[in-house]
Image: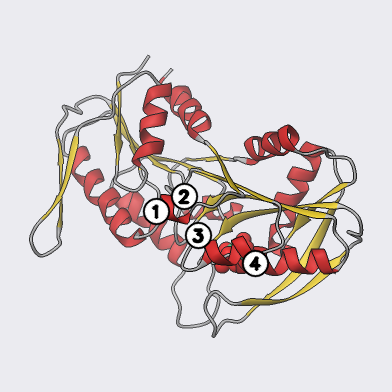
Amino acid sequence: MKDFILFSGSSNLPLSREVAKLLKISLGKVDLTRFADGELRPWIREDVRDKTVFVLESFSFPMDEHIMEMVLMGDAIRRGAPETMIAVVPYLGYARQDKLHRPGEPVSARVIAKFLEVSKYKEVITVDLHNDAIVGFFQVPVTHLSALDLLAGEVKKHISLKNSIVVSPDVGGTKRARNLAYALDLPIIVMEKKRYLDRHDVSESYEIIGNVKGKTAIIIDDIISTGGTIAHSAKSLKDAGAKSVIVLATHGVLAGAAKEKLADAPVDAIVITNSINVPKVKLFPRLRMVSIAPILADAISRVVH
Ligand code: R5P
């Protein structure tokens, strides 16, 4: 087995600790302090020479701070002459900006990929990217994990699949929904969602392509941010006669008033993962969480064994 260390940024310490526990190691010591003016000053307190070094950081809110932690920790570690350095990014923020939506905007996901590379990360391990094509933005190898089996397992444990249907809340998510439908052996329907380039985070106009009357609708999405997509699609599904609505999503961004919006939505249960550390105040009874620590620990084990 290779000699390895796992460091954690500040974005998701509970997940890092869980991964470390599964790997039967302690997290590497790093001080993440700031100067009085707010500048970050990471200090790696371990000898990394000739070691395989992993750094776990979710690019969740405040994403720019977390990205900067990742970049500066990368520079600090590579100066200690490790064998290799691998970024473990359970949630890749900026992934939704994966194309030039209109002239004058950046392709931000591409920039984030570059940041990791210039910080000398030689590989990336990540989970359920908004779009599979983002893997191609990286020049280094990417292990693209999926939480789909974990989410599917959770559904199987808690609901009867008889008379259920998998729903993609937008055309972009069709492949994801198809994979879940395959895993659960269920049919799939696709909804149509409209976004407005000049109105951030607003989505409207839901059309259902398929019949949901009397069925349990299992919506699958990659991200729940403002909760608008889920609230609107759940309402449309109910209006169209769905008996109940279950929601599965990998990344619980839960921005702004998402909690209130989701709590008011006609949804029976929402299952997300811990790819993002959701603060306790944002939790509510119908929101359940499954841990992706086992799939991350497994991916790390495969590198070091
Ligand atoms: C968008 O294409 C994504 O797959 C999600 O549907 C979206 O990010 C959810 O955002 P919100 O919760 O703000 O509607």
The residue pinned by badge 4 equals 229
| Quadrant into which the C terminus falls | top left
Residue 130 or 115: which is nearer the viewer? 130
Crowding around mark 1 (Cα neighbors within 10 Å: few <14, some 14 to 19, many 20+) is many
Name the kind of residue labelled 3 in the image.
Leu
- Work out how far the residue at label 4 is from the one at label 2, CA to CA, in angstroms: 19 Å
Q: Of discs 2 and 3, which sits in the foreground? A: 3
Q: Of discs 1 and 4, which sits in the foreground? A: 4
Q: Of discs 4 and 2, which sits in the foreground? A: 4
- Work out how far the residue at label 3 is from the one at label 1, CA to CA, in angstroms: 14 Å
| Residue 59 badge | 1
- Work out how far the residue at label 1 is from the one at label 4, CA to CA, in angstroms: 21 Å
Q: Of discs 3 and 1, which sits in the foreground? A: 3
Name the kind of residue labelled 4 in the image.
Thr
The residue pinned by badge 2 equals 91
Q: Mark 2 or mark 3: name the one nearer the start of the chain.
A: 2
Could you tell me residue 37's position as x and y percent? 10, 65
Secondary structure beneath label 4: helix
Give the quarter of the image for residue 85. top left
Name the kind of residue labelled 1 in the image.
Phe
Residue at position x 57%, y 81% in the image: 197
Q: Is mark 1 within 8 Å of ligand 1?
A: no
Crowding around mark 3 (Cα neighbors within 10 Å: few <14, some 14 to 19, many 20+) is many
Could you tell me residue 110's position as x and y percent? 45, 61
The residue pinned by badge 3 equals 254
Q: Is mark 4 within 8 Å of ligand 1?
A: yes
- Work out how far the residue at label 2 is from the one at label 3, CA to CA, in angstroms: 13 Å
Could you tell me residue 247's position as x and y percent? 68, 52
